[in-house]
Amino acid sequence: MSECSCHKNKIDDYVCPVVRLEKLADRIFWLTVRCPELAKNALPGNALMVYPSEGGEPLLGRPFGVADADPVRGEVSVCFMLWGKGTELISHFREGVMVHVRGLFAVPFPDRDAKIHIACGGAGAALFLSMCKVHPERVAGLYLGIPGKGYEKYAERVCSMVPGAKVFTDDGSFGEGDSMFKVLPKELGAGEEVWACGPPGFLAALEKHYEKSPEKLFFALDRHMACGYGGCMGCVVETKSGLKRLCVDQSLFRSDEVIKQ
Amino acid sequence: MNDLTVKIGSLTLSSPVIPASGVWPYEEDFWRGEKLAGLGAVCTKAISLKTREGNKGTRLMETPSGLLNSIGLQNAGVDGFIKKYKDMVVAGGKPVIANVVMERPEETAETLRRLADTCVAAAELNISCPNVDGDGMAWGMEPCGAARAVKTARAAWRGPLWVKLTPQAADAVGVAQAVEAEGADALVAANTWLGMVMDPFSGKPAFDRAVAGLSGPAVFPLALRLVWQVCGTVKIPVIGCGGVTTAWDCAQMLLAGAAAVEVGTAFFRDVHAGATICAGLPEIMARFGCQSLAEMQGKARN
């Protein structure tokens, strides 16, 4: 394990200090660590793995998309939802504590000439925040769906990084209504695409919304992952063009190319 | 300078640590430079005669100090291996151990024949995969099946032949002895342990095949016991495999009689696990007054 000294775009393990851990909602946290090499090399779509403990339990790291990278400060951030024992332990990290991180992996988002509408549920927005920051000219709009009360700080964080982001809350307590589907453009013009990340039910609703143009709807997906470097073959997504590993083969999938499990 | 070299039959390895099959990726970065530090050899992912897609559905589930996997031998087939990966893995400079799936005898014999000119240092016959039906582990469950598999492989492969055992065999010692009798050059004890887990949302088995292979620190004491048992009954080298994570784990396997270790899940926590383990061995060797790992091998049995 090294102290932040790997080669560009080569996966490695690092021990690095926690800069801050912020609670942005009841179950959503924002973790920033100082790791200059990762911060310098991170591209939109990249991911890293945070290990909850230095012992053997839990055994594996937790993979998160890079939400923000600041090469000047040498800081890289991920945003995660509290889901189980691993994320519970990470949510108790304290400033200054040295933690084990693996990165960078996951293929950067494709750099094509398209205007992108980003539709996200919950913490799924974090995956796209660095792209909004690095390539604002490519983003037509960001639509965020969250439960509502208690998620104000998370919504503020997203809106601070993506001015003009539209927030929708299930309970209608704030934002622009209770459903993004009332405003998310159904007819997409030439060169327009929708990129999405969120829970399965949300992605299914998007498929229904864009049933006439599935070729313009793209998903960032989630799978159990062990290694992050292409070895274990655990994080595969079954597509019409074969099995793709999330960690090294492909990060973004056309909705109609994914074969449902 | 401590001597970390080990001998496995005719092969001399610079260290006792070998990434187990299914762990080391076919990525350029892993076959050159510092990621190879501390490794005595590298075992490939499983190689079958034809391409295999592997298993559907969930493939991984974490367990307390362990990992269940149900990958199902996904691989590009022997021709795909030769075409896409052979040059890269051989150029890495480490001895390459080709993990070969025991399928129907004529299929495995053909796979081995096609590997004959690929410069791999040894073939590791996999009679122990718990994640496929009909072949894999089925060959390794009984001495007679294991013997037939090894006889087939021995006839088709002139190089060093290692055989990876299954811990599910009721008579693992009998299987080991049968494998030795048919001409294997080394044993790997062992593959993953059959386990299962329920999906917390469906209340059904998490894996499509219900069962999966357990690895990681949780299985180390079981694997060590198996190595202890097998080493006392065969003369060919035994490679310890199962939950080896630390230098002390490696040393325990050697003390029990293993000649080397295969390391799997530990790489998921430490991509430099080979170097980490090797770095810790000299202190342990000094503790037991050993100048070489050969001196440590089997020391607990004396």
Image (tube, grey):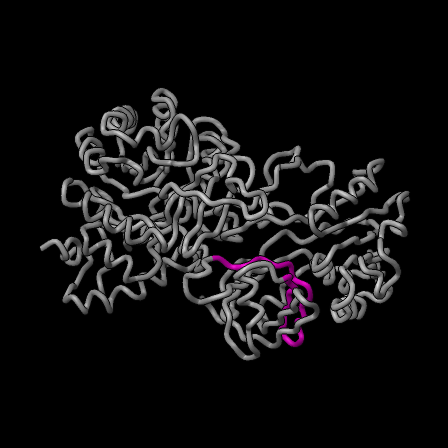
Q: Position of residue B29 (x, y in %)?
A: 49, 53
| B239 within the magenta span | no
**The N terminus of chain B - image quarter:** bottom left
Q: Is residue B184 visible?
A: no
- Residue at the spot x=38%, y=26% of the render? B103
**The C terminus of chain B - image quarter:** bottom left
- Residue at the spot x=42%, y=46% of the render? B91
Query: With respect to residue B103, does B203 lie above or below?
Result: below
Q: Position of residue A95 (x, y in %)?
A: 57, 79
| A63 within the magenta span | yes
Q: Nearer the viewer, residue B268 or A158?
A: A158
- Residue at the spot x=52%, y=77% of the render? A97
Q: Magenta residues?
A: A60-81
Q: Position of residue A122 (x, y in %)?
A: 72, 58
Q: Is residue A140 visible?
A: yes
Q: Is residue A65 left or right of residue A189?
A: left
Residue lying farthest to the bottom in this orientation: A96
Q: Nearer the viewer, residue A114 or A240?
A: A240
Query: With respect to residue B79, does B201 lie above or below?
Result: below
Total marks shown come to 0
